[in-house]
Image (tube, coloured by chain):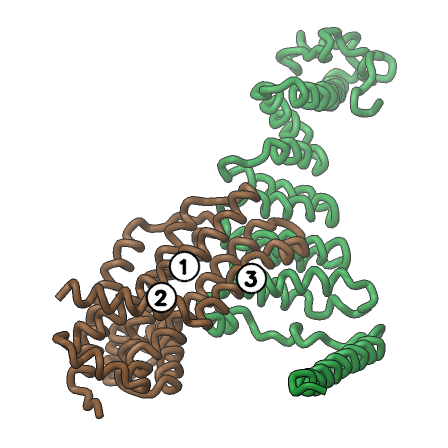
Amino acid sequence: MTPASGLRSPSRGLGLAALACLLLAALVQGGIETRAAGRSDIHPLLYLPSGKYLKIAALGFDGILADTIYLWSIQYYGNYQITDRYRYLEHIYDQVISELDPHYLDPYLIGALIMTAEARRPEMALKLLDKGIDRNPDQWILAFEAGFVCYDDLKDYARAGRYFEKALEVPGVNPVVRRLYAEMYNRAGDKRASLREWSEIYRTATDDYVRNIAWNHVHDLSVQVDLVELTEAVRLFARREGRNPRGLAELGSKGIVVDLPRDPEGRDYRYDPATGDVSYRGGLILAR
Amino acid sequence: MFARVAAIALNTFREAIRNRILYTLLVFAVAMISFAQILSLLTVGSEEKIIKDFGLASIDIFGVLTSVFIGIGLVSGEIERRTVYTLLAKPIHRFEFVLGKYGGLMITLLVNTTVMALWFFLVLIVKGMFDPRLVLAVLLLYFQFLLITAIAVLFSCLSSPILSSVLTLALYIIGHLLWSLDLLKEKLTSPVGKTACAALYYLLPNLQNFDIKGQVVHGLPIDPAVPAFATVYLVLYGSAVLLGACAVFQNKELQ
């Protein structure tokens, strides 16, 4: 054996021993992971203090810290094996991430999505989104998202309308918000206001797609509003005169209706003097 | 005088680029900037924010570490190796030696920051996410490194490398927490305490002046006065620290 090969052998032995130790360590880690699988241990990150205090410790790296916790949160809340994972949901998004980086929009949106779609806590989501709106008044998407939570989850159309209205105040808002805003009046039962909004969308539409959508709504809402108004007018006539009008034109001659409406196709509405019922000759477009 | 300072600076730069710490930090910085792309795949939403945050944070962290670990050995290393005697035996003033050393590290940091920034910008250009305001953010980070280097040089003239690194890193942390002194001042009732807080607030290095990372990443408006004030602050505070370092080294007994 040469001196050089004598030196190589011990170093090769040490290298192999190191490799063996590393493999054993990996095996032990595998054992730890296997034991931990399925256990719903509380993740240490859930115990993080408020972002207000973390910001102090971040030494100017609050942005990257918010990114890291956000990335972790997506993986954690997406893990269906942890059954009680929503316990600290509000703390992580509302107290930690949004405090560390108040202008980071994704955690507001994704946090709200997890709160509504997964944890079934829409009010918690609205609280988070309200905070985001307060800190990012130039971002329409947060008010839009809050409006959508009210519309889709809470079915509170008036509240949804208020959020959409707030989103519409932001320059550069997506035109779809205006359409949802108009529709919220309809869902809340205020068809006149909805018609006013849809008419404005129809008037200002710059492309055929939007104009067609708006026309469909304007058409149906016009019919519905006219029918309600004419029915009320017929009832008023009947109370005053003790009989139904012979025709709708009589409502005009008696001064109950100033300008007798026609349907969107320009025809008179159908009227039955025997029953006093007013109806539309065609069919509603959106009901088809 | 300028020629002598420049000669020392150039020599310090040559020495620094042979330092393995510099390359290790640079490799780690480049790796971390690249890693941000992989990490961004885990997100739901905007990848851009994560890539920009990680890129700027990497430049910041590794730039500060370079400033500290190379800065602290600039003077004390020369004393330990006794090479300072050879240098000072020549017709140069001690303050020229300190300024030259600082100048050398300025060039090293410029090269280091440029390499990290170019890699970062290249990643962003390829992904179509480049924002010219990032250049300003990196420039202000470079200014921060220059101030930290000045502090490291001062401590290097005063004490051992280990103590210098601890003190410089401590001042780095304090420099990012000075706003808390302002808050403390509001809470205190004693006029003496208030005055002490105010004095410390204005006398300690305020490194937040060089941090516009958040505004740049989120596309928020930046007051044009911020970079101007940061530049003037660097020149004045950096000069004060370097003059202090020159004064300390001038009176230092070299045995």
Residue A78 spot, x, y in % from top left: 76, 60
Depth-wise, is mark 1 or mark 2 nearer the camera? 1
Residue B120 spot, x, y in % from top left: 49, 53
How crowded is the residue under tag 1: few (<14 C-alpha within 10 Å), some, or many (20+)? many
Q: Say the numbered circle drawn on residue B145.
A: 2
Numbered disc 2: secondary structure: helix
Question: Which chain is represented by brown in the image?
Answer: B
Residue tagged by mark 1? B113
> Which of the image's four quarters has the C terminus of chain A?
top right
Instruction: Tell me the distance, in whole angstroms, between the alpha carbons under discs 1 and 2.
Output: 9 Å
Residue B169 sits in quarter: bottom left
Q: Chain of mark 1?
A: B
Report the amino acid beneath label 2. Answer: Phe
Residue ID at (80%, 15%): A280
Instruction: Tell me whether the residue at label 1 lies in contact with that at label 2, contact meaning CB atoms closer than 8 angstroms.
Output: yes
Residue ID at (47%, 67%): B23
Residue tagged by mark 3? B32
